[in-house]
Image (spheres, rainbow, N blue to C red):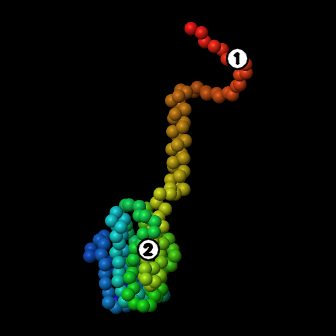
Amino acid sequence: MDVGAPISPKAFLSPGATLNSIGTLTIDNLLTFINGTLQIDLNSNNGIADEVVANGVTINMSIFGDGLFSLTDLGNSALPPGLQFTIIDNTASSSIDGTFTNLPDGSLLTEGINTFKANYEGGDGNNLTLEVVNRANVPENGMTLSLLTLAFAGLVLLRRNICGVGETVSVSKSRRFGNRPTHHD
């Protein structure tokens, strides 16, 4: 089965029965991407993803166009690191021939709040898998700066409420030696 052709507009292959649905597509023959895109849907809320099962896979990179990869998360949950999704189950004994232009072997792909690592030797050694290498719980630089700014603003407001506007607070350190005064009733 060919996805795309040298002179035709880009074609898409999406395993789900409808757009934005999860499914498995089984092809008993060689699957070839020429100027075509594999569109994979994943649902992070359920931990499931589309899958293509094919007896051999070739991803052509040629003057006619490259095979491209597209991932859409239908959910909004952080997935646990180490979770693997088999995207292409290559039932042939040979490895996948080629890689998607925008998804080299070992590359990272972020969709929603999850980050995945591509592996063209995944599963039993000749499948395309995406492994969660989630950094969802680590704020990005912009988020860190926003949190620091918010904390600083909170301190300024706290100071204004305690001291009043225009008042100055001074802190001094003093030591007193000798006897302490006692209080008698």
Instruction: Tell me which label, 2 or 1, sits earlier in the chain.
Output: 2
- The image shows residue 113 at horizontal and vertical percentages of 43, 62
Residue at label 2? 130
Which amino acid type is shown beneath numbered disc 2? Answer: Leu
Vertical side of 18 occupied by 93: above or below: below
User: Circle 1 sits in a helix, a strand or a loop, which is it?
Assistant: loop
Alpha-carbon span between mark 2 and mark 1 = 73 Å
| Crowd band around label 2 with a 10 angstrom C-alpha radius: few (<14), some (14–19), many (20+) | many
- The image shows residue 3 at horizontal and vertical percentages of 36, 85
Which amino acid type is shown beneath numbered disc 1? Answer: Asn
- Where is residue 50, by image quadrant? bottom left
Q: Are marks 2 and 1 in contact (CB under 8 Å)?
A: no
Label 2 vs label 1, nearer the camera:
1
| Number of marks present in the image shown | 2
Instruction: Residue at 50%, 57% (x, y): give it.
Output: 138
- The image shows residue 84 at horizontal and vertical percentages of 42, 72
Circle number at residue 83: none
Vertical side of 158 occupied by 179: above or below: above
Instruction: Residue at 41%, 64% (x, y): give it.
Output: 79
Circle number at residue 179: 1
